[in-house]
């Protein structure tokens, strides 16, 4: 009985540690509500860590062009994302016209994009750390291919 | 004995939480400064607000090396400063008392350049003769009034490079973040209103 308890505790602990590790980079949230012509609601929430993991499985030769184009901008992207993580929450861009409202803001550790108009509402929340690690992987892909 | 242990535990928790609060207060960064750009078009009912933390701009600019921008400096054509000793000119303005230095009156435009309270001020006013005479013309849409107010410290930082044909944008941004809240640029035409300013608010409200 005690042995079974220990095994159960071990499994639970491992599962908790795994969930903690997977969620360590935060969550990606996508919420799309379409009102016209038909009502659709798409809501996806996923651990951000899955994106850099998934990037590993993309064939390297398919990333060649993307990596080459991305690499010259990496110092700028790194500086921007590092500083973005360090700053307090703020609204980066806010565009309004008669029909649409677009907002890009930094909330917590995430970059949040909201688009609202008469027909649909879109909300995308992406952790900055995930953007950073994914772009680093993409940029490194080309050099890995070269090796 | 048990109560004493519980009390000690509670005290430890309280001390730990207070210490945590004090530490986080000490660790909190100094208030962020933002460069705001607001464009409003009353005719189209549009508005665009951009709020950029100056610290981000300061970190990004030195990493951009493209065209005339390199290491946070912008190279300006030597023809633009043909024979002008900008640093000498700035030194003369800095040491001069507050005054209006340049006034240009043209047929359809007034330009004034002045120094006031440590700021360099430029006003451009378009004179609408047709409007003054009560006539409406298409030209009225093109007319713009421009006001620029820049702290002299920022202008100094801008020209603080060793080369005469370079502007030090990063140094100017750094100086701007140390300056107080300031309305830097306003441009007003028939339908659009553009404002650029610096303050500590994270939104344009």
Image (cartoon, rainbow, N blue to C red):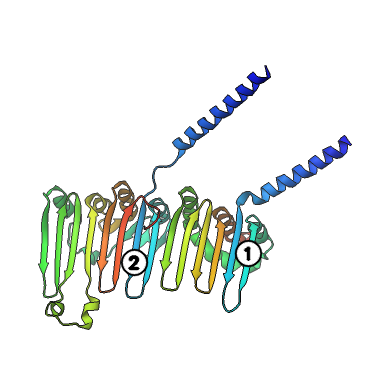
The residue that appears at 25% across and 72% down in the rendered structure is: B189
Residue A137 seen in the current view: no
What secondary structure is found at the residue carrying circle 2? strand
| Figure quadrant of residue A11 | top right
Percent x, y of residue B70: 38, 58
Left or right: residue B91 compared with residue A142: left
Q: CA distance from mark 1 to mark 2?
A: 34 Å
Q: What numbered label is drawn on residue B39?
A: 2
Same chain assignment for discs 1 and 2: no
* Structural crowding at the residue carrying mark 2, measured as other residues with C-alpha within 10 Å and reported as few (<14), some (14–19) or many (≥20): some
**Could you say which is closer to the camera, residue A15 or residue A83?**
A15
* Structural crowding at the residue carrying mark 1, measured as other residues with C-alpha within 10 Å and reported as few (<14), some (14–19) or many (≥20): few
The image quadrant where one finds the C terminus of chain A is: bottom right
The residue furthest top is: B1
Q: Chain of mark 1?
A: A
Q: Chain of mark 2?
A: B
Callouts 1 and 2 close, C-beta under 8 Å: no
Compared to residue B181, the image places residue B133 above or below, namely below
Mark 1 = which residue? A43
- Mark 1, mark 2: which one is toward the viewer? 1
């Amino acid at each position: 009985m005690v042995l079974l308890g220990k095994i159960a505790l071990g499994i639970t602990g491992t599962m908790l540690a795994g969930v903690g590790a997977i969620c360590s980079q935060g969550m990606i949230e996508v919420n799309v509500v379409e009102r016209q012509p038909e009502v659709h609601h798409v809501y996806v929430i996923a651990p951000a860590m899955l994106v850099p993991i998934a990037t590993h499985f993309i064939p390297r030769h398919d990333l060649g062009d993307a990596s080459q184009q991305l690499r010259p901008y990496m110092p700028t992207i790194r500086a921007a994302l590092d500083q973005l993580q360090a700053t307090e929450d703020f609204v980066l861009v806010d565009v309004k016209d008669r029909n649409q409202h677009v907002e890009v803001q930094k909330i917590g550790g995430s970059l949040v994009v909201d688009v609202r108009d008469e027909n649909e509402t879109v909300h995308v929340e992406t952790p900055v750390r995930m953007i950073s690690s994914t772009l680093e992987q993409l940029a490194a892909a080309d050099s890995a291919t070269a090796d | 004995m048990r109560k004493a242990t519980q009390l000690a535990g509670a005290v430890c928790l309280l001390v730990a939480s207070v210490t945590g609060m004090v530490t986080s207060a000490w660790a909190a960064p100094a208030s962020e400064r933002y460069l705001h750009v607001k464009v409003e078009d009353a005719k189209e009912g549009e508005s665009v607000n951009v709020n950029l933390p100056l610290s981000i701009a300061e970190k990004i600019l030195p990493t951009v090396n493209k065209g005339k921008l390199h290491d946070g400096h912008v190279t300006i054509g030597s023809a633009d400063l043909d024979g002008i000793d900008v640093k000498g000119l700035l030194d003369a303005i800095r040491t001069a008392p507050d005054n209006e230095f340049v006034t240009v009156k043209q047929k359809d435009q007034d330009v004034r350049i002045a120094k006031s309270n440590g700021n360099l001020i430029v006003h451009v006013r378009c004179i609408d003769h047709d409007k003054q005479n009560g006539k409406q013309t298409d030209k009225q849409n093109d007319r713009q009034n421009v006001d620029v107010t820049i702290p002299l410290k920022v202008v100094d930082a801008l020209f603080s490079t060793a080369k005469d044909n370079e502007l030090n944008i990063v140094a100017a941004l750094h100086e701007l973040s140390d300056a107080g809240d300031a309305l830097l640029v306003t441009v007003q035409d028939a339908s659009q209103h553009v404002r650029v300013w610096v303050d500590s608010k994270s939104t344009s409200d």
